[in-house]
Amino acid sequence: MNEDVGYWRWISLSTIALVTDSAVYHWSMEGNSEPEKVMQRHSKLDGYGIMNYAVSPDSKWAALAGLKSVNGTAAGQVQLYSFEQQKSQVLEGHAADFLKFTFEGNSSPSILFAMAVRSEGAAKLHVIEVGTGSFRKSVDMFYPQDQGADFPIGMVNSEKYGIVYVITKAGYIHLYDTETGSLIYMNRVSQQNDTIFTTTPHTSTGGMLGINRSGKVLYIGVDENNIIPYICNTLQNLDLAMKMSSRCDLPGAEELFVTQFNRLFQGGDLKGAAQVAAASPQGVLRTQQTIQRYQNLPTQQGQTAPLLIYFGVLLEAGKLNKIESISLAPAILQQGRKNLLEDWIRDDKIECSEELGDIVKQVDTTLALSIYLRANVPNKVILCFAETGNYDKIVQYAKTVDYQPDYVYVLQYVARGDPEGAVTLATMVAKDDNGPLAPVDQLAEVFFQRNMIKQVTAFLLDVLKDTEEEGALQTRVLEANLVQAPRVAEALLGNDMWHHYDRARIAELAEKAGLFERALEHYEAMPDIKRVVVNFQQIRPEFLVKYCGTLSPENTLDVLRELLAASRGTIQVVCKIAATYHEDIGAGNLIDLFEKMNAPDGLFLFLGSIVNFSEDPDVHFKYIEAAVKVNRMGEVERICRESNVFDAEKVRDFLMGADLKEQLPLIIVCDRFGFIKELTQYLYNNQMLKFIEVYVTKVNPSKCPEVVGSLLEVDCSEDFIRSLIHSVSADVPVDDLVAQVELHNRLPLLYNWLEQRVREGATDAPTHNAIAKIYVQQNHNPEHFLKTNQYYDSLVVGKFCEKSDAYLAYVAYRRGECDYELVDVTNKNALFKYQARYLVFRQDLELWAHVLNPENEFRQQLIDQIVSTALPESDDAEEVSVTVRAFMNAELPNELIELLEKIVLENSKFSENPALQNLLILTAIKTHDEPGADKDRVMNYINRLDHFEGAEIAGIAVNAGLLEEAFTIYKKYGQNEEAIKVLLDHMTGEDRITRAYEFAVKIDQPQCWSKLGAAQLDENLVKESMESYIRAADGSNCVSVTMAAERADLYNEVIDFLLMCKQNVGEAFVDTELAYSYAKTERLAELEEFVSAQNLADKEQVGDRCFTEGLYLPAKLLFNVCQKYEKLARTLIKLDDFNGAVDAARKANKTKTWREVCEACVEADQFRLAHVCGLNIVIHPDAMMDLIRFYEFGGHFDEIIELMEAGSGLERSHPGIFTELAILYSKFRPDELMGNLKMFWQKVHPQKVIRACEAAQLWKELTFLYVNHRDHDNAAEIMMAHPIAWENVSFKEVMSKVSNLDTCYRSITFYLNHHPENINELLSTLKERVDQTKVVTLLRKAGQLPLIRKYLKSVQEVNLESVNDALNQMYIEEDDFEALRDSIDSFDRFDNLELAQQLEGHDLMEFRRISAYLFKKNERFDKSIELSKADKLYQDAIMTASESRNQKLAEGLLKFFVEIENKECFAAALYTCYDLIRPDVALELAWRANITDYAMPYMVQVMREYVVKVDTLYDLHLAAEQAKVAEEEAHQQAVVQQSGMYGNGTLAIEYNPFGGNGGMPQQMPPQGGPGGFGGPSPQGFGPQGGFNPGY
């Protein structure tokens, strides 16, 4: 879409209509859709200003209305467009709209198009049904005479009331009835110059909203309570009043409907009367009285019953109300037409209620559930869910409707018929996401009471969380399972799920159940543990091992002792336990245990399992000892070989004293731990030379030297020693052997053996060391050997030679380059010449550093030999170089200079060596400042020498402070930049700048000028520095120069410097500083020219600097050029240009800028401009708060309220605006706050406004906020704390929604104190939420129980003990025994015995009779009979005796009647207690009292019963005998058949069960008849008969 939008409006929640000059577009806000063209704008509307655009409710039609001024009058055109036909029709009209309206008799609504027009001829309102309808209505519109030019400007249709609102330009509102076109109301609502230019429907109220030119939002609506009376009394249009009242269900026309109904009913038009009742507003005629009137009419034969006519009309008209539904349902159900009722419920034709559900439940529980759901009867919905097995829906439904049922009662109800379902329900109740909905213990108690152990176990397994509070439940479920299902209990305990039950009790039960493992886990006392653990055959070994880990070490030791004492078969498990926990118990304790229990095999097994890991020496020793005892020598050898832990001496002594045949373990121990001497002497002393030879040759030949030394100590023969040495041959360590022999001064003993090794080609150092020692010792040409032999160790032999000949030691050390040993021996023996030659030859700087150390007392003698002998003898340059370096490192400058002058200046072969020249000059520089040094020596060397490194030497001279020498070197080598650098950077004095300037002029190099400029800048010679930089054309240091120039206020001079820099550098800094200099020197024209041309200047930064320094005009110029409008606005504020500042803020469009300008305008009293700025601030919540505080601090309360009111109408308004506006109202205009909240409560942040209302003590407004934001608890608290905010209906509605039950109880107290007349209404509202017991207690404490009698009767159906007790006490106090008896019979939850005892002594007999009745109900039959006898209520006494089933009581009562000579009651008692009284007792009592006639019916019945019993027994006996005869006959026949005798054998004698000889049985006794006792019992007596003697 590329056209400008001239008009737009929302046409739905997600669609905007856009009207351009040529078309209409619809733009959906859902997704990323683009505007879609829906219709072409008609050419007849060209030039017309669009006032409204409307779309029909079915989205099939659209109307576009426009206005245009023609000859001073307003002409209007309406384009009516059909989306289906895509056709338009242009009509003359000013305002138009659509509405949906249902005409009387139609089932579906019609779409109406309404249009208002005023032309020269007339003013009309047209209402037309678009589409296929035929409805048309045109009526004249009335305008006041003084408003001849007035015309419609807006129209809104109300579907709720069927009213057309028409707004005119002059501010008049017209209300027309849509169907009749009647004018209902007209009045001016806005002034003529304050035109309402836009309107919209207010759907929820059926009214309209409009905005006039002054910005006020107007609401126009219908007063439902007064409009019908207005039509009746003012307009006197009764037909319209009845139509509108019926259509919109409005009050005010009730008498009209009643009159018309009575007229038709009395005239016999029953259907017409029913139609009037159906149409009556607010159900004024749809009452029980109307139904009763129809019921009372007789039904004519062949015609429909009047009541059915009535209900038929109502069902056709709509939905039946509660009373009608309850009245109709029983008749429908009696006819078996339940499906018809289902259809009506589905079609919402009847009103569902609790009473209707109760009626239907007797027939169909599912259908009743549907009714209860629709009627919102939570308690009965839940019971229906339980009956139908929909347990999963119970909790979900209760949460949905916010109802708290008695889940324990529901669970009891379910558990009776569906135990598994009860588990499911209980689990859901206990595991609700918001916590248990009922106490878990009470839920579990339901199962325990019914002994549902399996179910309660499953339930508690699922819900218990193992907390301390659940300990009792854990104990109880475990007890039940241990008694009835031990395996289940073991599984529960094995899973380790619970830890808070009574462990002692569970342990005891587990032991009784044979679950010894579980018993051990729970017992804590050692006597119990010892008693259980002896049942080890039934306890798994691995369990015992694990269990012992839970005991203390001392207790574990006791358990092991108990096991060992119980049986030797426990060795394995005891050893395993000991091995597992030996670290905690202590290996020593366990060893003592096994030793005391005399179990060496157990000790061996135990120690064998831990010895490989134990670090306890005693464990290893005891294991060796045990292994020896059980003759396990292999283990002894293994431990002796592998263990590093045992006490070697202790084991050695044990093995030596064990008298072992095999000495290998002892040899291993002594070899490993160095007991060679002891071993050798032990074996030698015990004549075990064979084991010595075995040890040396096979076990460890390396120990031969020690063995030899030990043998030498005991004076063993040399022949055995030589043979022993030769036997090991090459495996013996020569140096150790030589040391041992040398220690005993027997070295020649080895000569032949050594010579033999040399002849065999041995080249090892120890062998040749030994020969060298022998040569030196025997003086056998040792120098030749030392110089020619290449195998001996120079260090070893040298040390040996030092004792006899120092020169031989020097020879040995030189041969092996043993530097420090050589220096040491030459120093000690004054062999400095040899030492000097060796040092020059070695060329080792570390060695030089050692000998030239000042602490060396022989250093000077050595230096003399070096200078005089060693160094002159050398022609090797490297030797000279290393020697010189050594002198340098030793810091011997004077000696070094002397040496170097001799080498360099005396024309030796090293005279032109650059390194030596450098070294000479450097050494001279280093010694320049020493006392007595020649000060001209360095300059002399510089002038005489030409091969040194000039730059390096000059740098060193500078560092040494020899600046003239350094300057001379730089000039000599042509390094002018470095030379001037010496003058400027290192020299001091007032003439250094002058010398440098003269040197720069002489050289005239840019680098020199740059250096000079930098130095001048450092001396603060800014102007001279800029000149030097200009001559150098160097802008590299432009930043420092510019900063210095600015500090010196040289802005005019710095411009030339910056222009030079711009040509050579071209950096942004240069342009920025140039612009600033122009601004600083007020050269605004040049500044404007510069910033307008291409440049890199940071204009914003320059502007900021100018602004800071008060240069507002340059700042304005710069900010304008760089388009920094926020800063421009700030600058214009400084210049008092507020209009310009607002324009700049608009361009900047930043909240901070708007705020700064706004505050400036407020301070300058420019409130109009501040208002403009404020509207752009309040749309930002954060900035809005600061702005409000600013206005409040300045005392501008009305201005900020006006600003916030305007801000609330912005498109970008947010909840913060409405919130703060409400807060401002609460502070400064509290009377207007309620109106504001009613319109915008949904848009405010409730908590902030609530706090404001609390601070202002606006309790009504605070209550309104709490209610509308669903904080009903606080709303109730406010109403109770501040009665000014209380209103009965509102309070009840609030209390029905509070979540805190304490609030409910406080509200009851509140009503008791302030509004006792309404307390029953309140309690009815809270009936489903409060605890009735607590309510009764509360009212009883207040002494006001009678006040809530009505309420208590309404809740008694729940059958609560407290309610029943309260009502029963009221009935007693009021002497209403009938009500008490009904209450007792209907509701059984009360203390029967207590009430019976209370009534036992009551003054009225009826109450005492109730007492007897209660005793009977509680099986206190004797007490009940005594009371009845006392009051001569003999019938009650007889019935009680009968119900007791107690023979003693019945016979006692019979005796009582005999005693008081009451014959009739005697007969009645015999009749009623017939089966309890013994015949002999009855006959005896009657005979003694001479009342046998009264007992005779009883005796006749007794005789009859006895005869029947005898006959029955006889018949049974006869049948058994006959069966037995038949069986014997069959057996005999089978025998005859088997034997082949079919008549030729013995005759079969017929069996006679009754005796006699014949085949016929004896005659049977008579079977009844008129004179016998075996006939049927007489019909006149007995419990089944009709005889009742009366009493």
Image (spheres, rainbow, N blue to C red):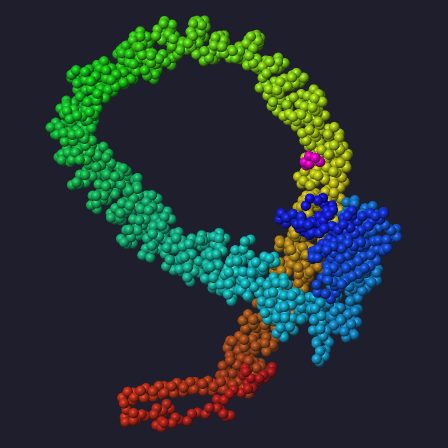
Say if the magenta span includes residue 520: no
User: Is most of the magenta stretch helix, strand or loop?
Assistant: helix
Q: Nearer the viewer, residue 187 or 1125?
A: 1125
> Could you tell me which residue is drawn at 60 percent across and 22 percent down?
1066
- Where is residue 1151 drawn, in percent x and y? 68, 36
Q: Nearer the viewer, residue 1296 or 970?
A: 970
- Where is residue 1483 drawn, in percent x and y? 51, 85
Q: Is residue 1444 above or below residue 658?
A: below
Q: Nearer the viewer, residue 962 or 306?
A: 962
> Could you tell me which residue is drawn at 86 percent across and 55 percent down?
121
> Could you tell me which residue is drawn at 56 percent across and 78 percent down?
1438
Q: How many marks?
A: 0
Q: In the rendered structure, which segment of residues is drawn in magenta? A: 1146-1151
Q: Is residue 327 above or below residue 727?
A: below
Hey, which quadrant is residue 711 in on the image? top left
- Quadrant where the C terminus sits is bottom right
Residue 550 is at least partly visible in this image:
yes
Left or right: residue 287 versus residue 669 is: right
Residue 1491 is at least partly visible in this image:
no
- Quadrant where the N terminus sits is top right
